[in-house]
Amino acid sequence: MSPRAQRGSVEVPEVGSLPALVEVEAGHGTAVLLVRPLHSLDDVVGTNVGIDITTDRGLLHFDARVADYRDGEVLELDVGVREVIQRREYARVDAVLEVTVAPGIRAVAVNISGSGAVVSRLDGLAAGDAVDLLLQLAPHEPPIVIGGRVVRECDNELRAVHFERVSQADRERIVHFVFQRQRLELQRMSGT
């Protein structure tokens, strides 16, 4: 695998979504699975799969067919259609923020932007489901009331939520939080 490989996932029918390092170039792809599936993949050659790669600007989705499977972890892929599922208008940062999901379920946002977040503990919710959130950016600040919709399942425990209803002032608070977090991360990386 070259340094161009990106973290992503491969959706295998009847197996599920498997995290992988994925490299796609000119109709060919390679996916190195990062976990061993519970079910054997010995008969996966010829199967149509989906590949999802998260980038800074959104989710890239590829339709592919498994051309070869070897060493219990490497899928060689014939890659077809590429589609940008979501384009992001806002920068996104990793965070651990307290979220209350109506009615009274505590959760954690593991990353956030001005337009959405990836939230834990939303079991049972699927893409398209509406969700109400109370987001706590800092202990001394009032929570932000958000009406959102699940746009995708990231794994068994995480759901990506797009913010549909949030006041402009609160969205600006989130954007400011993300900007400050990015600035701190850059300072940490530069050692200043």
Image (spheres, rainbow, N blue to C red):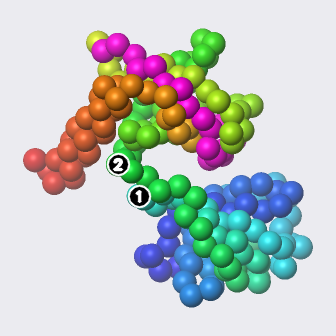
Question: Residue type at mark 1?
Answer: Asp
Q: Which residue lies under the disc numbered 2?
A: 91
Between marks 1 and 2, how big is the CA–CA gap? 8 Å
Left/right placement of residue 117 relative to residue 137 reads right
- Dot placed on the residue nearer the N-terminal end, 1 or 2: 1
Q: Which residue lies under the disc numbered 1?
A: 56
Q: Residue 126, position in %: x, y?
A: 72, 38
Label 1 sits on a secondary structure element that is loop
Give the label on residue 69, or none.
none
**Where is 32 relative to 87, above or below?**
below
CA neighbours of label 2 inside 10 A, class few (<14), some (14 to 19), many (20+): some
Q: Quarter-wise, where is residue 20 in the image?
A: bottom right
For the point 14% across and 50% down, which residue is it? Answer: 191
Q: Is residue 76 visible?
A: no
Q: Which residues are magenta?
A: 141-158
Q: Which SS does the magenta portion mostly show? A: strand
Label 2 sits on a secondary structure element that is loop
- Residue 28 magenta: no
Q: Quarter-wise, where is residue 128 in the image?
A: top right
Disc 1 and disc 2 in contact, CB within 8 angstroms: yes
Q: Residue 80, position in %: x, y?
A: 68, 79
Left/right placement of residue 112 relative to residue 161 reads left
- Residue 151 magenta: yes
